[in-house]
Image: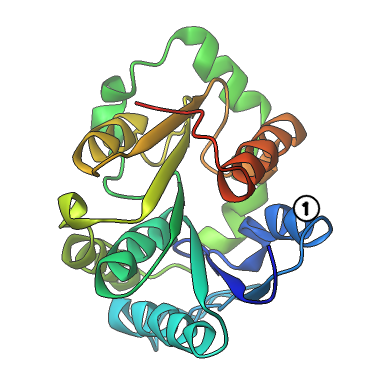
Amino acid sequence: MSKNTGILFLHGYTGGRHELDPLFVYLKSRYEFDYEFPVYPGHGTLLDLKSSGGDDWYNEAEDAYHALKSRVETIYIIGFSMGGVFASHLSQQGEVAKLLLIAPAFDHTKLSQLSRLKLTPRHFSEHMKLNMYSRIRKRIRDIPLAAFQEFKNIVEMKRGGLENISSETLIVHGTIDLLVPYQSSIDAAEKIPGGQLKLIEGAPHLFAYTEESQLELNIIAERFLFDDEKVFLV
């Protein structure tokens, strides 16, 4: 890969660069490419979601796409969670050669619907070992109810048209994701022409929470983006 190719990194709802930074660092240390790595208004290290909404978040992603497009010939997009939904929509609006969707938030899990995830008691046990709540509880206090409604609205607006995606697409999802049901990625991969899917056993929503899951994601992403051979066919 050369500077004629750029990668757009799109993080998730209430997140920031930290969600994709381990993957970014891994790829950048091994390959040369241009990139854009926007942080949506109100997101990042300190959350302030009262003064921005879903359109502002998507527009930031779209502006970053156009900025990158002005500098390179070929664009790849890596989108995590809500960023995966944005990535899928952007790929329908402009030229995107490869699309890597990581736990894309085409759906979200309600507590009353945990049974949809088909988790075993062992899955719950492994998930609790991650102690994720302790890592995010301070951020949860900064999320107003209106902001969650903005998230639901913008996802509803941007998640359609998967059958129109012409980019080479790989979806990666963990099997103990309690925020986005992995079944939604199975469904999405079936709708996207030529869509590829890789489920990672025992991986949570945010891969960076465990070194093993992050390493596996790094290798999968590298093979998809930099190898011509398709290895994860649905």
Name the residue rendered at 76%, 35% in the picture.
211
Which residue sits furthest top? Answer: 121
Q: Which residue is mark 1?
A: 26
Identify the secondary structure beneath mark 1: helix
Residue 223 against residue 154 in the figure, above or below = above
Which residue sits furthest right? Answer: 29
Which image quarter is the C terminus in?
top left
Residue 75 against residue 171 in the figure, above or below = below
Task: Pinpoint residue 47: horizontal percent, then vertical percent.
Answer: 55, 75
Q: Is 120 left, or right, of 56 in this rendering?
A: right
Q: What is the quadrant of residue 214 in the picture?
A: top right
Q: What is the quadrant of residue 36 in the picture?
A: bottom right
Task: Pinpoint residue 112: horizontal percent, then vertical percent.
Answer: 24, 31
Which residue sits furthest front? Answer: 228
Name the residue rendered at 39%, 50% in the picture.
168
Kind of residue at disc 1: Tyr
Task: Pinpoint residue 32: horizontal percent, then vertical percent.
Answer: 76, 67
Name the residue rendered at 43%, 9% in the picture.
120
Which image quarter is the N terminus in?
bottom right
Name the residue rendered at 63%, 75% in the picture.
35
Q: Is 216 left, or right, of 205 in this rendering?
A: right
Task: Pinpoint residue 57: horizontal percent, then vertical percent.
Answer: 39, 78
